[in-house]
Amino acid sequence: MSPGFIVWRTMSGVMGALPSSLADRVARALGASAYYLWFTRRSIARQNFAHVLAALMQDLPIVFVSAHFGNMDYAAPAAVERYRPMTLAAETIKPVELFHHLAHQRSQNGVHLIPYDQAPRKIIEAVKRKEIVGFLIDFGINAHKDINTVPVTFFGETTFFPSSPAILAQRYHAPLMTGFAYIGAHKQIHITIDPPILISPQLPRAQAERETMQLVAERFEKAIRARPEQWYVFRPMWPPKPRLMDHLRQP
């Protein structure tokens, strides 16, 4: 049993005995102290960040797409600290108070969480400010009711990915990048960025959405196959066959 686990179990019992308001303040203070004092603090290794630098040198906004993979809580603040603010379209979790708390915490590091139902206006504003606009799109097929999607082949089966990243990248001439943060040896965080996807403005929108998001799906699959233990997906990613056929028949 590791010392870290023993400390965690002990402090969990202590926190449970305190009033919630006091426990929250104590937990925050201990968390910050642990980061600065813990001798095995994680470091971050950036790989292929030349793609990001090239886009920044051209003074372009960046559309960034990733998955719930590895440790994005380290990766996003690292990108913000070195490059630009980030606006991240996120699924609203319940209770709503928890979402607001997480949004506040992320904002302290320059990462602004925007609920998907409020995302279009806020994201367009962020693009015009030439920020990094991020999407975590592996939130499952049950959350797609009010979101534009396109069919993609993912691990040999048809499913649906949100098409918003492709629409945004084409409309505002922004490079679309996929990237992942995985936990490597000695708990080091490795951030890898794939080459940018450049979408021609002359390409018909429907074709641009299908081709771009299929390429995103292939990059997701490659990263997950290499390190499947690092993908934490919370909801079904593939629809049952009857529902799939109904969706594909829609105009």
Image: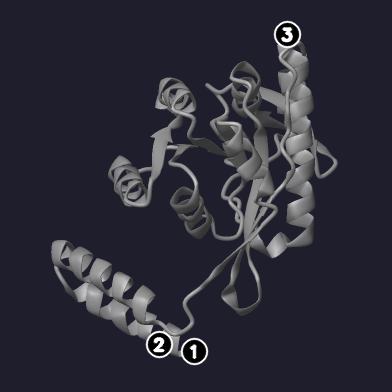
Per the image, the residue denoted by label 2 is 6
SS class of the residue under badge 3? loop
Report the amino acid beneath label 3.
Answer: Pro
Question: x, y (%) of residue 156?
Answer: 85, 41
Question: x, y (%) of residue 16?
Answer: 24, 72
Nearest the viewer among 237 and 85 is 85
> How many residues crowd around disc 3 within 10 Å: few (fewer than 14), some, or many (20 or more)?
few
Report the amino acid beneath label 2.
Answer: Ile
What is the spatial separation of the Cα atoms under label 1 and label 2, in whole angstroms?
7 Å
Per the image, the residue denoted by label 3 is 251
SS class of the residue under badge 2? helix
Q: Which color scheme did the rendering employ for the protein?
A: one colour
Q: Is residue 206 above or below residue 89?
A: above
Nearest the viewer among 188 and 52 is 52
Question: x, y (%) of residue 108?
Answer: 32, 51
Q: Earlier in the sequence, mark 2 or mark 3?
A: 2
Task: Give the mark toward the camera: 3 or 1.
Answer: 1
Q: Is residue 84 above or below residue 192?
A: above
Per the image, the residue denoted by label 1 is 2
Q: Are marks 2 and 3 in contact (CB under 8 Å)?
A: no
Q: Please state, as top left, top right, bottom left or bottom right, where the C terminus lies in the image.
A: top right
